[in-house]
Image (cartoon, helix red, strand yellow):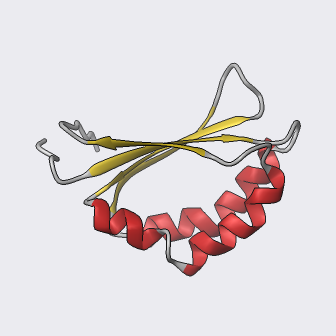
Amino acid sequence: MDSTDSIALIVTHHALPGRRDAVRTVWEQHMAPAIDANPGHLAYYYCFDANQPDVITAFQQYRNAEDAAAFLQTDPYRAYEREVMPLLASAPQVQRLTTAWTKVSV
């Protein structure tokens, strides 16, 4: 699939020791429904690191850069950000990628 207009983000969160499940609870409350309803998200994977018990990595693919920027201005994202920051050891690390090709299986 040619996805040259889409962008992808890899976001890594380092939760405070023992707080990863609390981060997930906040994510499920605010982000899961917002992402599910957002047509700008082409893909989203919320993953626990198998080797580091306090690390969460999210892979996101958006239709385009405008959709990615617009999502950051939504009420659910802002509520998530407010509630999750006290549970994190540091600010999330964000890696922005330009999508060159994807495979989607349904």
Indicate whether 78 appears above or below 103: below
Residue 60 lies left or right of residue 15; in this view the side is left
Instruction: Please indicate whether residue 78 sits to the left or right of residue 94 in the image.
Output: right
Total marks shown come to 0
| Residue located 51% across and 77% down the image | 74
Name the outermost residue toward the bottom. Answer: 75
Q: Position of residue 76 (x, y in %)?
A: 59, 75
Percent coordinates x, y for residue 37 in the rendering: 43, 72
**Near-viewer residue (41 or 9):** 9
Which residue is drawn at the image coordinates 40% and 73% (left, top)?
A: 70
Q: Who's the residue at 29% across and 44% down the image?
A: 106
Q: Residue 49, position in %: x, y?
A: 64, 28
Q: Residue furthest top?
A: 51
In the displayed structure image, the side of residue 87 where residue 60 appears, left or right: left
- In this rendering, position of residue 72 left or right of residue 29: left
Look at 26% across and 60% down and name the residue there.
Answer: 64
Question: Quick one: which residue is furthest to the left in this view?
Answer: 2
**Vertically, is 75 above or below 49?**
below
Residue 1, quarter of picture: top left
The quarter of the displayed image where residue 18 is located: top right
